[in-house]
Image: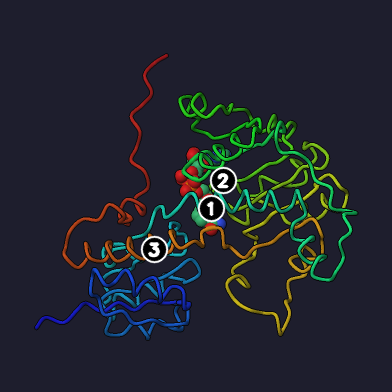
């Protein structure tokens, strides 16, 4: 009997194992779950496996990709959308790389709104107070979201769901995206606006754009200075969209009224792990945790049953395509990524 293809699944937590085992009932792969992250130090664990499965903090850098290829690994399945942790140049011609481009925009959008609501109505503080028999309302005053202005930066899959939810609250929504979609704006009742207007007019700003050279540190001293006093900032995008030291200065001055952060500039050192017994060395993160009007979650916006089930099913289907020698719609074209985008034809004379 032909043996089942074996997959080494790195950086696994009990919940990954649970959802992958459930999805695997349809595929029948031989899954082996490893707790450590894949990197140059741990790559030897992949010996004998034709495929590896990795997450956001595994490092498929050049030495790791070289070692994988030398050991006979042929497929790298990312169980996430981003692939900045894979050296595509090193993978080119040796490893097929597949990913999960979308798992649940609703999960992330709903979490962004959960942060917004909790910060506004101080639910996180009320929870602690009532458990300590403190039933005072002093300091818990919020505001109606209805009628206020939200700025949504990035109207891709997640940003659009956020726009829909906030419009449902009766908010005015200003959106910003380099590719504005007028049909979406008309249907949802939002309006595209330049960033300066979003910064100036919004009571709440929520970030749903990718991290690129253009978007890195888009929230910094200079842009914070343009914002309404008391603005709430929500970031479920990427930590480096915000210059955290400037955010802290804005919180101290009161320019920023609240911040809901599911991502953090230096999160890879801490997020997903338990440091409660030893404490943390990162003084910026430590300072953030001291503000009563800052709510931090550790990159959990995606973390719903539906998203985990989609991630597992899509990853295993991607690998089924690889093992069957079929193209996968979720394959990263490593050659294209190395070669860069094709040359555009010259613009016609205006
Ligand atoms: P998407 O690719 O569907 O949408 C991104 C949108 O941002 C696009 O419409 C794009 O045109 C726009 N954009 C690009 N540059 C921009 C700029 N300079 N200013 C404003 N908009 C810009 O991506 P999706 O699925 O909506 O995800 C958005 C981001 O959310 C991801 O890039 C990722 O960083 C983050 N994310 C976070 C998760 C979490 O658990 N916290 C989970 C999944 C994604």
- To which residue does mark 1 refer? 108
Earlier-in-chain disc, 3 versus 1: 1
- Mark 1 CB near ligand 1 (8 Å cut): yes
Q: Residue at x 81, y 65 (%)?
A: 130
Question: In 3D space, how far apart are the residues under numbered discs 2 and 1 (Cα atoms)?
Answer: 9 Å
Q: Is residue 47 left or right of residue 64?
A: left
Q: Is residue 30 left or right of residue 165?
A: left
Residue 73 sits above or below residue 195 on the image: below
Pick the front one: 266 or 318: 318
Earlier-in-chain disc, 2 versus 1: 1
- To which residue does mark 3 refer? 309
Question: In 3D space, how far apart are the residues under numbered discs 2 and 3 (Cα atoms)?
Answer: 23 Å
Residue 34 sits above or below residue 282 on the image: below
Q: Is residue 140 left or right of residue 180?
A: right
Q: Is residue 238 left or right of residue 91?
A: right
Do tag 3 and tag 1 residues touch (Cβ < 8 Å)?
no
């Amino acid at each position: 009997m032909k043996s089942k293809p074996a997959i080494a699944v790195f950086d696994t937590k009990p919940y990954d194992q649970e959802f992958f085992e459930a999805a695997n009932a349809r595929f029948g792969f031989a899954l082996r779950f490893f707790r450590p992250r894949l990197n140059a130090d741990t790559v030897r664990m992949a010996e004998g496996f034709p495929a590896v499965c990795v997450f956001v903090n595994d490092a498929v850098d050049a030495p790791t990709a070289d070692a994988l290829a030398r050991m006979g690994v042929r497929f790298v399945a990312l169980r996430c959308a981003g692939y900045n942790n894979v050296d595509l140049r090193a993978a080119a011609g040796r490893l097929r790389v597949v990913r999960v481009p979308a798992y649940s925009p609703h999960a992330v959008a709903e979490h962004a709104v959960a942060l917004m609501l909790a910060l506004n109505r101080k639910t996180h503080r009320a929870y602690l107070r009532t458990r300590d028999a403190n039933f005072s309302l002093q300091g818990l005053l919020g505001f109606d979201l209805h009628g206020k202005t939200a700025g949504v930066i990035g109207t891709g899959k997640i940003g659009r769901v956020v726009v829909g939810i906030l419009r449902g609250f009766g908010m005015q929504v200003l959106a910003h995206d380099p590719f504005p979609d007028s049909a979406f704006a008309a249907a949802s009742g939002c309006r595209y606006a330049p960033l300066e207007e979003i910064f100036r007019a919004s009571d709440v700003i929520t970030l749903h754009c990718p991290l690129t050279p253009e978007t890195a540190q888009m929230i910094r001293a200079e842009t914070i200075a343009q914002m309404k006093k008391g603005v709430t900032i929500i970031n479920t995008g990427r930590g480096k969209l915000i210059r955290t030291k400037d955010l802290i200065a804005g919180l101290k001055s009161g320019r920023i009224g609240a911040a809901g952060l599911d991502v953090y500039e230096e999160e890879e050192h801490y997020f997903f792990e338990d440091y409660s017994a030893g404490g943390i060395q990162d003084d910026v993160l430590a300072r953030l945790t001291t503000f009563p009007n800052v709510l931090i979650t550790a990159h959990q916006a995606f973390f719903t049953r539906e998203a985990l089930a989609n991630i597992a099913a899509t990853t295993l289907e991607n690998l089924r395509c690889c093992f069957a020698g079929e193209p996968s719609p979720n394959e990263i074209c490593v050659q294209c990524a190395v070669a860069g985008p094709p040359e555009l034809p010259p613009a016609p004379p205006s």
